[in-house]
Image: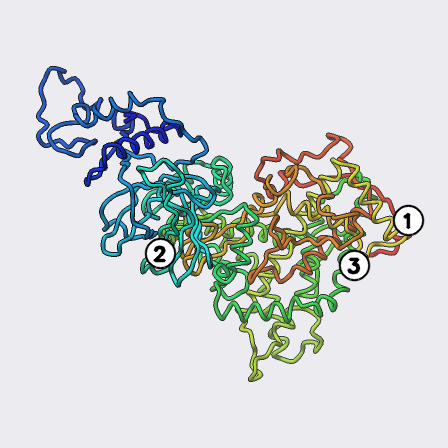
Amino acid sequence: MLVGKTTLKLNETITVLKENDKIMGNEGASKESQLLAVGSSERGRKMKSDRGGRSKSRSRDYSSVECHYCRELGHIQNYCRLFKEDLRILKNLKGKSKVENSANVVNYEGDLLLLNTNPVENSNWVMDSAADVHKYIERVRLKLHNGNVKIIFNVRYVPTIGANVILLGELASHGHRYVDTKNLCKVYKGDNLIMQGRKKQNITYYLDGCTLRANVENNNDNQKIEKRVHFSDMNKRSRSLLLPLPPGPTGFPIIGCLPTMVKNNIPTFQWMHKFMRKMRTEIACFHLGNTYFIAVTSPELACEFLKKHDAIFASRPKVMSSGLFNKGYTSTTFSPLDNQWKKMKKVLVTEVLSSSMHKKFHEKRRKEADRLVWYVHRQCSNELNDGIVDVRSIAQHYCAGVIKRYIFNKRSFGKEKKDGSLAIEDVEHMEAIFTVLFHLYGFAIADFCPWLEVFDFDGVKKIMTNAIAIFNKYHDCEINRRVEMWKKGIASNEEDNILDVLINLKDSENNPLLTIQEIKAHIDDIMLATIDNPSNAVEWSLAEMINQPKILDKAHQELDCIVGRDRLVEESDLPKLNYIKACAKESFRLHPIAHFNLPHESSKDVVIGGYFIPKGSQVLLSRRGLGRNPRVWEEPLKYKPERHITGNGDTGEVMLSDHELRMFSFSTGRRSCPGIMLGSTLTTMLLARLIQGFHWKAPPNGPATIDLGSPEDDNSLMKKPLLAHATLRLEPQVYLQLHS
């Protein structure tokens, strides 16, 4: 029957099955199953090539050969009497049967497809994982709850329980998945629902639909039944194993896809994004070394991971890069989910980044914001610079200045110059920060294969070690000096910085709550997390505004209307600056600083979106994939701040975070960013002060627009630091009131 075809058309398959049913109905079904074989073209090509140059007239011994059609020994399918007879009957019946094109048929491709034409009389249906021990392979036609007719192959009858078994493993191996919810079990092929069962007992489901008997054509004779779907004595682990992993590239044992990743000779995040675009999937699994990496670009799946199953994915993996920086996994950001993490997170939320501390340190933020405008004003007045400003530098060092005032009560590690130019110590410190940021969880080989750390094939360990040494050089001396001052009683009793707060925390027995190592870990975490996100968003925002002057004009109008030109914008004005915040939020969406969020490690096996996620998997939410998802965002590659303002812009405040995870500015769940208040304030104030205080254009001796690169580029930072031409736009006395 239809020999040599790898795929069957809908009409062909239904016609053959119906005509065969008629034959069985007229002639009577034998006790033994009649099997119709559909051989694949691959088998045919192989058999043809195996004959090679053998003479056609040369005889062959078929005594030990099994026919693929009737399964008897002594001949092959071409010489099978039963096969020839069935083929003759089918040819005579061709075109006589009417076919319902609306019926849906499930076709399984393989080397041999076996179709049993005997009717299945038993009404008990079981969805089982251990069906390989059962016998009597069957096929059955089901009319489901939605009216579609499905032909299910490899249905096995189990005499001991008097039930028919639908192989979930067989369904999963051909791309199906099932979702086992509280009261409903659904089997999907892609996004299409194949069948469903409703739960009525502890572990029993009842399949919605009815059986179409093989020897009955009239729908009035259909046997109306309610089929029982039962998961027989399976624990949760074995049930999950029936589900497939998310789609991903084929790997090798032990090392997974590492050779493929290295062979591509592009950054790993680009390789992952490229694969997902090619496969048109919003979730993918990459097996690298001994770890599964689950990349996600779907907001719905992201919410399942970080909201619905937050407790399972609240841990961090222990890898070489984070272990080097995190001083034995003692801090908040990089520690696994344990008691140490809970202790450090509580300190960070209640003592360091609380709303009361935010109010207390308002003056530190105001001083740094004033210094920002003062410095840009000096650049505009400097004839040597001709008003050209390095926006990346001033943005990064503004954020660094604020957090250094927070921690050490000073804005520079070196001696500040009168013209405001940076000290060499601050430049070195900033370079170390971004070196660490770009290599933490950066897919180093030793992160996948810890036993290769000693060889340091990609040089990441050496790079990280050098950068961390710079951190220690500037941080440790300040921390140690301050600790000694408190021990000797010569420090000021006023805790006016974070370092003093951490040193003086006490436990229930009035002993120091934190060790020196834990204090250093906290300081490193805060310093690392404060600078990159706000400064990058502001640099991209200003570049996009220069290329789209209408957006810049609209931002100027909002500031002039709410603040005016006779004073500088203050933090009390920020809640009203919805358009300014929308511009910053659009940069978070379109130009995220990192390609993925920090990995979330699964603490146990779980099913997400119908896919099996093994324990120990690392989930990576793609910031770029979420923010540029065309299913979620209209014109996703266009910088369009208006998309974040609802209504007329006067109803409701624009927030920089997105709790539905359609974009990723600040995380959510147990691992959410505790500094969201500080980060939002720094971002908005930095952008508002730069836009209010100055007119911005591209440098006069260059192109009229800023080179942003291709929208398809996977750049986090701009390819080159933004150099823009600034001119004054406020009343002169506003600038004169400022000082260094």
- Looking at numbered disc 1 in the image, what kind of residue is underneath it? Glu
Q: CA distance from mark 2 to mark 1?
A: 78 Å
First in sequence: mark 3 vs mark 2: 2
Residue at horizontal 71 percent and vertical 39 percent from the top:
544
Q: Is residue 399 visible?
A: yes
Could you tell me residue 238's position as x and y percent? 34, 56
- Looking at numbered disc 3 in the image, what kind of residue is underneath it? Glu
First in sequence: mark 1 vs mark 3: 3
Could you tell me residue 434's position as x and y percent? 58, 50
- Looking at numbered disc 2 in the image, what kind of residue is underneath it? His
Closer to the camera, 662 or 587?
662
Residue at horizontal 37 percent and vertical 31 percent from the top:
14
Residue at horizontal 25 percent and vertical 25 percent from the top:
44
Could you tell me residue 131's position as x and y percent? 27, 50
| Kind of element beneath mark 2 | strand
Q: Nearer the viewer, mark 3 or mark 2?
A: 2
Q: CA distance from mark 3 to mark 2?
A: 61 Å
Query: Quick check: marks 1 and 3 in contact, CB under 8 Å?
Result: no
Residue of label 2: 230
Q: Is residue 442 above or below residue 315?
A: above
